[in-house]
Image (cartoon, rainbow, N blue to C red):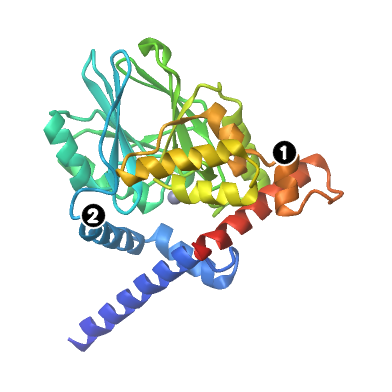
């Protein structure tokens, strides 16, 4: 009994420590950070932590989810964001002609299953952007529920319970759904994004960006240098301007507040913030945005702009261009992390 109680205390302590470390973020690289992050990512304690968030969200939103579910439909292509946990999104992508569906990051099986049952859909595959439990935490359960379901993940990231290894530039096909995999190290060492080819549906390309890029934001650089992250952001910048961005979290309002704070004269950021505020009043999903739009207000995609360098104080440095852009990205990240706590 005493042993059990001891184990419970240790588990609660670790959970609390992990939560504290993950949310409050001591300086990346500090010993405290390393311990907490390793616990979160490499052990199933991180999954317990995530499940606790799911319970919290259930109470907070009374089982309704943080956002309303509304599909975006093109010619035979249907994309349905599914609200999970406190602010996560999974995506159900369906080729309506062949009735083939895949899921992106369905980490909360019960929330996603309700949608699948209502729509009478059996998913063919799961595409997992990275190892963090709020993206991968459902994989084991999906394998149990759907015998033979394929779970795609990057082995570099050690995605929990994946069945199919993926690598940069891999093409994945499910009916008329064709995805290209792009590795985007930065948030995690093996983070990937999935680009859905739009042409079979006369639709724009769709980027399922996980925690790499959000509406007006980008993921924290947990496992790479700013130079590596910058490289991964540039990969996205090379996609066509009409690409629709479908991110892994509903962070738009917070991100745009920060964008407006950094660039107070940026009209595009101000207008988008107003639009997003209106959408959130009725709990609407703020995505997708287009890459063209993101280029006008997303600070993390604008580190080569003079206004951004001035905003983060790197404009007078004598670094080489590459170093300067990486340093601007780092300073932007630092400011965003601090800004969040003021809200
Ligand atoms: Zn993540």
Query: Which residue is identified by label 1?
Result: 305
In the foreground, 144 or 267 = 267
Q: Is mark 1 within 8 Å of ligand 1?
A: no
Q: Is residue 51 left or right of residue 46?
A: left
Q: Earlier in the sequence, mark 2 or mark 1?
A: 2
- Callout 2 touching callout 1 (CB < 8 Å): no
Examine the image and state in which quarter residue 145 appears: top left
Question: Badge 2 local density, few (<14 within 10 Å), some, or many (20+)?
Answer: few
Q: Residue at x 26, y 57 (%)?
A: 57
Q: Is residue 71 visible?
A: yes
**Which residue reaches farthest bottom?**
2
Q: Residue at x 31, y 13 (%)?
A: 75
Q: Is residue 18 above or below residue 155?
A: below
In the picture, the quarter occupied by the N terminus is bottom left
Q: Residue at x 43, y 41 (%)?
A: 276
Residue 294 position within the rendered picture, expressed as x and y whole percent measured from the top left: 55, 34
Query: Which residue is identified by label 2?
Result: 61
Residue 226 position within the rendered picture, expressed as x and y whole percent measured from the top left: 65, 49
Residue 324 position within the rendered picture, expressed as x and y whole percent measured from the top left: 77, 46
Q: Residue at x 40, y 67 (%)?
A: 19
Question: Badge 1 local density, few (<14 within 10 Å), some, or many (20+)?
Answer: some
Query: Which structural element holds mark 2?
Result: loop
Q: Is mark 2 within 8 Å of ligand 1?
A: no
In the foreground, 104 or 141 = 104
**Which residue reaches farthest right?**
318
Q: Is residue 241 left or right of residue 70?
A: right
In the foreground, 217 or 139 = 217
Q: Is residue 160 visible?
A: no
Residue 67's tag is: none
Residue 111 position within the rendered picture, expressed as x and y whole percent measured from the top left: 20, 45
Q: What is the CA distance from the residue labelled 2 to the residue labelled 1?
A: 39 Å
Query: Which structural element holds mark 1?
Result: loop
């Amino acid at each position: 009994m005493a042993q059990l109680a001891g184990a419970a205390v240790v588990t609660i302590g670790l959970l609390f420590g992990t939560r504290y470390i993950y949310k409050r973020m001591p300086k990346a690289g500090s010993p405290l950070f390393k311990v907490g992050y390793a616990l979160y990512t490499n052990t199933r304690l991180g999954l317990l932590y995530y499940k606790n968030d799911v319970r919290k969200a259930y109470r907070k939103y009374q089982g309704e989810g943080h956002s309303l579910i509304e599909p975006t439909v093109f010619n035979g292509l249907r994309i349905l964001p599914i609200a999970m946990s406190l602010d996560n999104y999974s995506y159900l992508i369906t080729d309506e002609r062949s009735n083939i569906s895949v899921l992106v990051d369905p980490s909360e099986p019960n929330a996603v299953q309700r949608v699948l049952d209502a729509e009478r859909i059996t998913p063919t595959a799961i595409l997992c952007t990275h190892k963090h439990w709020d993206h991968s935490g459902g994989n084991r359960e999906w394998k149990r529920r759907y015998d033979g379901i394929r779970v795609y993940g990057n082995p570099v990231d050690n995605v929990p319970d994946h069945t199919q290894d993926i690598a940069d530039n891999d093409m994945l096909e499910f009916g008329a759904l064709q995805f290209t995999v792009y590795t985007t190290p930065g948030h995690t060492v093996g983070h990937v994004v999935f680009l859905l080819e739009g042409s079979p549906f006369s639709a724009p390309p769709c980027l399922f960006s996980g925690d790499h890029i959000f509406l007006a934001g980008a993921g924290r650089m947990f496992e790479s240098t700013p130079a590596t992250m910058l490289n991964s952001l540039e990969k996205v910048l090379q996609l066509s301007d009409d690409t629709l961005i479908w991110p892994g979290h509903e962070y738009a309002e917070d991100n745009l507040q920060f964008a407006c704070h950094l660039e107070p004269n940026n009209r595009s950021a101000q207008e988008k913030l107003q639009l997003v505020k209106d959408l959130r009043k009725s709990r609407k999903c703020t995505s997708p945005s287009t890459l063209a739009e993101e280029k006008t207000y997303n600070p993390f995609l604008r580190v080569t702009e003079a206004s951004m360098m001035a905003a983060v104080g790197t404009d007078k440095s004598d670094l080489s261009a590459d170093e300067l852009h990486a340093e601007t990205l780092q300073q932007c990240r630092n400011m965003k992390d601090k800004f969040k706590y003021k809200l």
